[in-house]
Amino acid sequence: MTQARLTGASVEAVAAWQDPAMYGYAYGWVPTEFDDTSIVTIAEKTLTATVAEVMAHEDHPVEVTTRLVQGPASQVLPAVAATALLLVVGNRGLGAFAGMLLGSVSQHCVQHAPCPVVVVPE
């Protein structure tokens, strides 16, 4: 947020989602965009809540828009960064040693994004 404020930029918070790999659906259940437990609904609620939590701690908020994009995060994030000045991603380390490493998505973004990338540890 501070970088956006200092440069006069806006922030676009992006969440990538994809259906879980499965061989079929449970009998009688068919996913719909109106299903409250759908992946899209969960991703949208999570994105909205995350942005709201961050904005609650901002003294001088900047313009923030949100976008859900279907696909693997490692492909979606570099693609949406095509028009970005900066791509900010988190790392996803698990445990003390793994926490020092980049996750596969952040590693892919660092290598393939068309703009500078900042990886923020948890």
Image (tube, helix red, strand yellow):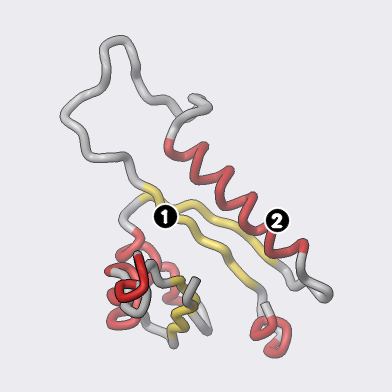
Residue drawn 35% across and 60% down? Answer: 73
On residue 52, the disc is: 2
Residue drawn 38% across and 67% down? Answer: 92
- Picture coordinates of residue 88 (x, y %)? 49, 76
Which quadrant holds residue 22? top left
Camera-side residue of 62 and 103:
103
Mark 2–mark 1 Cα distance, whole angstroms, equals 18 Å
Disc 1 residue type?
Ala
Which mark is nearer the camera, 2 or 1? 2
Please determine whether, in this image, residue 69 is positioned above or below residue 2: above
Q: Mark 1 and mark 2 in contact (Cβ < 8 Å)?
A: no
Q: Helix, strand or loop at disc 2?
A: helix
Residue drawn 34% across and 82% down? Answer: 110
Camera-side residue of 93 and 115:
93
Q: Residue lying farthest left?
A: 23
Residue drawn 29% across and 79% down? Answer: 112
- Picture coordinates of residue 14 (x, y %)? 51, 61
Please determine whether, in this image, residue 70 is positioned above or below residue 1: above
Please determine whether, in this image, residue 93 is positioned above or below residue 9: above
On residue 68, the disc is: none
- Picture coordinates of residue 53 (x, y %)? 69, 58
Q: Residue lying farthest right?
A: 59
Q: Is residue 41 left or right of residue 113?
A: right
Q: What residue is disc 1 on? A: 16
Q: Helix, strand or loop at disc 1?
A: strand
Disc 2 residue type?
Ala
Q: Residue lying farthest front?
A: 96
Number of callouts: 2
Please determine whether, in this image, residue 58 is positioned above or below residue 45: below
Between discs 2 and 1, the one toward the N terminus: 1
Quarter holding the N terminus is bottom right
